[in-house]
Image: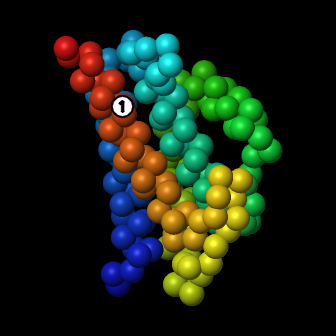
Amino acid sequence: MSNTLQTFLAAATRKAAGNVVTAVLNLPEDRRTWKPAETSRTALDQFAECAMNNGFTADIVEKRVVPFHSQEDYLKQKTDLVATGFDAIKSLLDTNTERMIAVILAFPDSGLTDELDLPWGKSTLAEILAYPYWNMAYHEGQINYIASLLSL
């Protein structure tokens, strides 16, 4: 397999998905919905974001549009997913991660610098393809931080 941005991102995305699952599983089950402060997020909330956003990012790349209508709509979908629990979230993460990896690997080099004007600003397709990896790595750290607070 050649060394392209797409092969790197596909491997990094798969590894980040495994790492975020491990981070959640390292928490005691009764602490996956705990938050250290009222303004904090739970591990399952962050895990659900990763699962959803991998699918949403694939939609953005394939259709060139944001697949939810409003921030409120997005947050309601995430809240509903969190309520389904770890197994359902992990199943969605697995499905959406594999879908995103397929999108990444199929993406042509010639389109990497194309830009999309999204509600949160302009991004190149290369940046959008990297988002699932970055987002899961970020939330792995946040979930591990929650775990570190439990051991104080």
Residue at (57, 87) in percent of width and height:
110
Residue at (54, 42) in percent of width and height:
51
Quadrant of the frame with the C terminus: top left
Q: Nearer the viewer, residue 111 or 2?
A: 111
Image coordinates for residue 24, horizontal then vertical, percent: 37, 30
* Residue 113 position by quadrant: bottom right
**Residue 91 appears in the figure:** no
Q: Going by the image, does 66 lie left or right of 148?
A: right
* Residue 57 position by quadrant: bottom right
Image coordinates for residue 40, horizontal then vertical, percent: 47, 22
- Give the labeled residue for mark 1: 143
Residue furthest to the left in view is 152
Image coordinates for residue 99, horizontal then vertical, percent: 56, 59
Residue at (32, 17) in percent of width and height:
28
Q: Nearer the viewer, residue 104 or 98?
A: 104
Question: Where 85 falls versus 55 (above or below)?
Answer: above
Question: Where 103 falls versus 69 (above or below)?
Answer: below
Characterize the local packing of mark 1: few (<14), some (14-19) or many (20 or more) Cα atoms within 10 angstroms: many
Image coordinates for residue 8, horizontal then vertical, percent: 36, 70
Residue at (20, 16) in percent of width and height:
151
Residue furthest to the front in view is 121
Question: Dot 1 lies on which element?
Answer: helix
- Give the total number of marks visible in the rendering: 1
Q: Nearer the viewer, residue 109 or 51?
A: 109
**Residue 139 appears in the figure:** yes
Residue furthest to the right in view is 69
Three-letter amino acid code at the position of disc 1: Ile
Q: Nearer the viewer, residue 124 or 93?
A: 124
Quadrant of the frame with the N terminus: bottom left
